[in-house]
């Protein structure tokens, strides 16, 4: 009897406990959720906001986003009178059609803040950081023709120097009438790069200015030089409504990342393909060496600063980048989140890249060098040295003064077998022979050194190989290796170097040396060694040639 009474009390207590849990869950679900509290505080012109779970559904894109249950004013047809609830900034597409997660990431079907923002464990696509929301444009778009940062900055400076902001608004600036009567509210150019613009705008402007007696056409416009017009056209072509993303992409095209990584099928293959790098699952990332919150943005930023610390065994050298550049590279990497889109939603720029083979960077030598070469050879071609690796200075005046263009071109196209310098003539890299020639022209412009003039044949040096072998062992092997395999200095038995380096190049390099490197001028005496006669230098070259290679 006592056991029966005890069981009844146990059943009653457990039932009350279950009832309390159900009541708490009902209260939480119906009164305490964030979206209910937000909607309860909102007011429309007609009175309180109707309380309901709002969502944007687009079956074609496969989305069902409930973000607008909290961000009410971003839902279609809502008229909320609240300073705290701002409408979505103006964009070229309708947020009520595309939803939120397509651009911003997160978990669209969730109704709790942490779940919706994707900051919970095991959700692979967390919401983008607020300050990097323009990275979401990379989900659909592939901005075409973005130059390196210095070129983009110069184009922007030209736009502002010529006072185009007197009449045109760009990214929220300009386009206002001035007290002195100058300027006018001309077309907004913030997104002119998406739909294209009239390349004959200068002639039209000149015609309007010549026909005006007074007013802003007379006071705010004057003839523009051809070089400035090209710079302005470049700047306008990059105005796609996402200035932060374009600026970040220009930094990416200045730091040599494409030398090791592919994006949209273009670039090197020594590092991981970054085409979908922004969709990296945070659960698969090691945050043990990443300070601060465990976010994908934090992981990317620290990986740029100290790659080997974040990824054990990484061969990626640490970038010599400022904090602003690291942030830009992080934003751009987060933007690499390409999503398969139905044909009706595929943007023109993405279609031009994926189906017509257009490239996302400009084809000038400066941008090509910045995007593909500067990561190893330095931003000004000054060379780069990291523990265990040394990359030569390709803009060294002493090198360019004796190196024929054919040697530089073929070294880029064919690479250096056995070294980290890959063959960029491979069709999979996305570089053409014209691109390589543009890079060589840029290097010579950078160093202000024209191609050398040499009427002698490629092979002309004569000397005693046995004497050259002895001199090489004493003076050269310490840097270039006993058999020319390379070390501190480049490999001299490399087949590409053997085939395309002229004897003049080899003799003059040994004789003159290379300023800023360990390669001294052997024609001149040094406290550590005696000077070599030209006949001795030719003997060394004859010995180097004995390693073979076609003439």
Image (cartoon, rainbow, N blue to C red):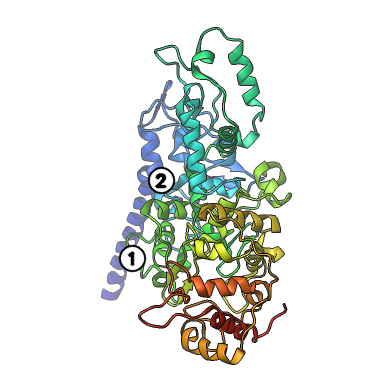
Label 1 crowding class (10 Å Cα cut-off): few <14, some 14-19, many 20+? few
Which residue ends up furthest to the left in the rendered image?
2
Label 2 crowding class (10 Å Cα cut-off): few <14, some 14-19, many 20+? few
190 shown above or below 219: below
Residue occupied by mark 2: 131
Image position, residue 4 (x, y; %): 31, 72
Q: In the picture, which quadrant includes the C terminus?
A: bottom right
240 shown above or below 528: above
Which residue ends up furthest to the top in the rendered image?
213
Whether the residues at callouts 1 and 2 have beta carbons within 8 Å, the answer is: no
Residue at point 71%, 42% (across, down): 344
Residue at point 65%, 52% (across, down): 340
Residue at point 55%, 42% (across, down): 99
Instruction: Choose mark 1 or mark 2, whichever is in front.
Output: 2
Q: Secondary structure at mark 2?
A: helix
Residue at point 39%, 50% (across, down): 324
Image position, residue 135 (x, y; %): 50, 48
Q: Secondary structure at mark 1?
A: helix
Residue occupied by mark 1: 11
Residue 526: which quarter of the image? bottom left
134 shown above or below 228: below
Is residue 109 among the parts visible in the rendering?
no
Give the numbered dot on residue 352.
Answer: none
Is residue 291 among the parts visible in the rendering?
yes
Q: Nearer the viewer, residue 181 or 532?
A: 532
Image position, residue 13 (x, y; %): 29, 63
């Amino acid at each position: 009897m006592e056991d029966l009474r005890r069981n009844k009390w146990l059943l009653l207590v457990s039932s009350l406990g279950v009832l309390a849990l159900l009541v708490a869950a009902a209260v939480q679900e119906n009164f305490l959720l964030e979206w209910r509290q937000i909607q309860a505080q909102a007011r429309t012109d007609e009175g309180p906001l109707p309380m309901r779970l709002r969502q944007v559904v687009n079956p074609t894109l496969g989305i069902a986003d409930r973000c607008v249950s909290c961000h009410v004013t971003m839902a279609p047809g809502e008229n909320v009178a609240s300073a705290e609830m701002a409408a979505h900034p103006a964009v070229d597409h309708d947020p009520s059609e595309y939803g939120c997660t397509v651009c911003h990431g997160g978990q669209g079907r969730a109704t709790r803040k942490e779940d919706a923002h994707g900051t919970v464990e095991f959700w692979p696509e967390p919401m983008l950081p607020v300050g990097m929301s323009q990275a979401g444009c990379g989900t659909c778009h592939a901005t075409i023709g973005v130059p390196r940062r210095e070129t983009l900055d110069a184009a922007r400076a030209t736009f502002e120097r010529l006072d185009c902001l007197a009449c045109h608004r760009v990214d929220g600036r300009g386009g206002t009438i001035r007290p002195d009567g100058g300027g006018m509210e001309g077309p907004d150019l913030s997104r002119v790069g998406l739909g294209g613009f009239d390349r004959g705008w200068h002639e039209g402007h000149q015609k309007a200015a010549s026909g005006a007696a007074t007013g802003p056409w007379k006071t705010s416009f004057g003839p523009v030089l051809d070089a400035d017009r090209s710079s302005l056209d470049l700047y306008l072509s990059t105005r796609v409504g996402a200035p932060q993303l374009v600026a970040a992409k220009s930094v990416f095209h200045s730091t040599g990342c494409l030398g090791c990584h592919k994006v949209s099928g273009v670039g090197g293959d020594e590092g991981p393909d970054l085409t979908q790098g922004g969709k990296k699952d945070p659960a698969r990332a090691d945050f043990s060496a990443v300070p601060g919150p465990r976010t994908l943005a934090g992981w990317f930023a620290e990986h740029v600063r100290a790659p080997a610390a974040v990824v054990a065994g990484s061969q990626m050298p640490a970038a010599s980048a400022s904090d602003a550049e690291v942030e830009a590279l992080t934003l751009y990497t987060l933007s690499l989140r390409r999503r398969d889109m139905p044909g009706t939603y595929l943007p023109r720029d993405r279609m031009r890249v994926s189906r017509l083979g257009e490239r996302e960077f400009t084809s000038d030598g400066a941008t090509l060098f910045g995007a593909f070469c500067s990561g190893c050879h330095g931003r000004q071609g000054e060379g780069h040295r990291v523990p265990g690796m040394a990359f030569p200075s390709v803009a060294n005046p002493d090198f360019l003064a004796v190196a024929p263009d054919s040697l530089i071109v073929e070294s880029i196209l064919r690479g250096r077998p056995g070294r980290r310098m890959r063959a960029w003539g491979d069709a999979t890299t996305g570089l053409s022979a014209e691109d390589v020639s543009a890079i060589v022209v840029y290097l010579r412009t950078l160093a202000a050194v024209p191609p050398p003039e040499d009427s002698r044949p490629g092979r002309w040096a004569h000397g005693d190989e046995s004497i050259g072998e002895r001199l090489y062992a004493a003076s050269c092997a310490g840097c270039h290796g006993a058999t020319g395999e390379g070390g501190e200095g480049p490999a001299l038995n490399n087949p590409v170097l053997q085939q395309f380096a002229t004897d003049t190049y080899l003799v003059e390099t040994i004789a003159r040396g290379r300023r800023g490197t360990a390669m001294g001028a052997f024609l001149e005496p040094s406290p550590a060694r005696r000077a070599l006669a030209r006949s001795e230098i030719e003997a060394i070259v004859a010995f180097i040639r004995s390693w073979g290679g076609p003439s």
